Image: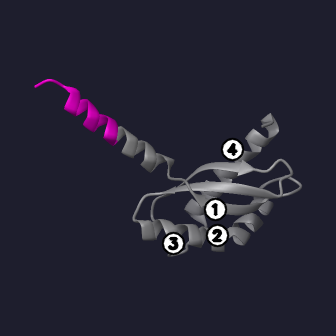
């Protein structure tokens, strides 16, 4: 990945985070939503936005649906905020790496507790 694309991904992540915090008032969105990473395609046609949501499975699904519904609005806002020729269309995906990492750590703790002599 080029340095330019890395900077653009970081910029998109920052601006989208700000928009979610300040502008988006969709009741479907969970109270704690974090944009973990953005992966824009090299041609800037599309960008995959990965979000982490704290909550139930239903809240996670609802949040991704709400963000998908707001994608056109978010893209329009990014067009106004950024000085790039083309703002990519946004696709939202649930990022469950934090939950998976916590689960793995929990398993490792249980294994370590079993191995300790009494």
Q: CA distance from mark 3 to mark 2?
A: 10 Å
Is there any visible trace of residue 15 in the rendered image? yes
- Say above or below: 111 vs 80: above
Query: Which residue is drawn at the image coordinates 56% and 60% (left, top)?
Result: 21
Mark before the other along the chain sequence, 1 or 4 = 4
Q: Would you name the residue on which mark 3 appears?
A: 62
Mark before the other along the chain sequence, 3 or 2 = 3
Q: Is residue 94 left or right of residue 59?
A: right
Q: CA distance from mark 1 to mark 4?
A: 16 Å
Q: Quadrant of the C terminus?
A: top left
Magenta stretch: includes residue 116? yes
Q: Would you name the residue on which mark 4 appears?
A: 10
Indicate the secondary structure of the residue bearing disc 2: helix
Q: CA distance from mark 1 to mark 2?
A: 6 Å
Mark before the other along the chain sequence, 2 or 4 = 4
Q: Position of residue 107 (x, y in %)?
A: 32, 40
Judged by depth in the image, the label closer to the viewer, 2 or 4, is 2
Q: Would you name the residue on which mark 1 appears?
A: 92
For mark 4, does the 10 Å Cα neighbourhood hold few (<14), some (14 to 19), or many (20 or more) residues? some
Mark before the other along the chain sequence, 1 or 2 = 2
């Amino acid at each position: 990945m080029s340095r330019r694309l890395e900077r653009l991904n970081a910029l998109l992540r920052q601006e989208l985070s700000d928009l979610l915090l300040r502008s988006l008032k969709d009741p479907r969105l969970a109270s704690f939503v974090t944009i973990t990473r953005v992966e824009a395609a090299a041609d800037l046609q599309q960008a995959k936005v990965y979000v982490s949501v704290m909550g139930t499975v239903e809240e996670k699904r609802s949040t991704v649906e709400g963000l998908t519904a707001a994608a056109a609005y978010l893209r329009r806002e990014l067009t106004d905020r950024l000085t790039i020729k083309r703002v990519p269309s946004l696709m939202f995906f649930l990022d469950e790496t934090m939950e998976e990492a916590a689960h793995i750590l929990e398993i490792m703790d249980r294994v370590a507790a079993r191995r300790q002599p009494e």
